Image (tube, rainbow, N blue to C red):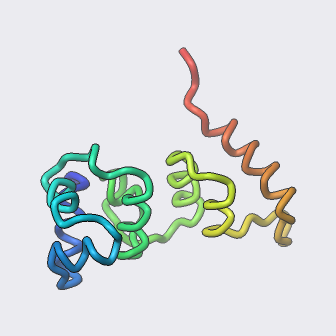
Amino acid sequence: MGTMGSRVRDLRIKNKLTQKDMAGKIGISHSTLSKIESGYKENANKEIILKIADLFDVSIDYLFGKSKNPDIHDVEEEFVSRLELDLSDEELLDRFDINFDGRNLSAAEAKTALAVFRAMFQPKQP
């Protein structure tokens, strides 16, 4: 499926961006982007990963090689991926509407739901 670095490079080239242009769009240095594209994942913190996914409108799972399809097609899958990045409640609520039985939850209800989701998707302790 490819590494995150090669996927980022391929997306950048497909969108006709230089490393300098892309780095400017996501607010990082050219050298940091170069390292990410070379496979040094420690240079890609969650904020940078989100900016890359948002810039190219692809899923985080695609960037990490968990999915072959770059399109964000499964909102629930993307929600779980972003939940696993330990985004704050505010960051998640900025990106997603949380609904139950066809109605948007209030901010308090949504935060309670997020606490439940976090408990459900938390890695199991051995």
In the rendered image of this protein, does residue 62 appear above or below residue 95? above
Q: Quadrant of residue 24?
A: bottom left
Task: Please name the residue shown 26% across and 46% down the image.
Answer: 41
| Position of residue 83 measured from the top left corner of the image (x, y, whole percent) | 58, 50
In this rendered view, identify the residue nearer to me: 47 or 122. Answer: 47
In this rendered view, identify the residue nearer to me: 31 or 45. Answer: 31
Total numbered labels = 0
Q: Residue furthest bottom?
A: 16
Q: Quadrant of residue 34?
A: bottom left
Task: Please name the residue shown 73% across and 50% down the image.
Answer: 114
Task: Please name the residue shown 57% across and 66% down the image.
Answer: 75
In the rendered image of this protein, does residue 42 appear above or below residue 25? above
Task: Please name the residue shown 82% across and 49% down the image.
Answer: 112
| Position of residue 79 measured from the top left corner of the image (x, y, whole percent) | 58, 58
Location of the C terminus by quadrant is top right
Seen in the image, is 116 located left or right of residue 92?
A: right
| Position of residue 63 measured from the top left corner of the image (x, y, whole percent) | 32, 58
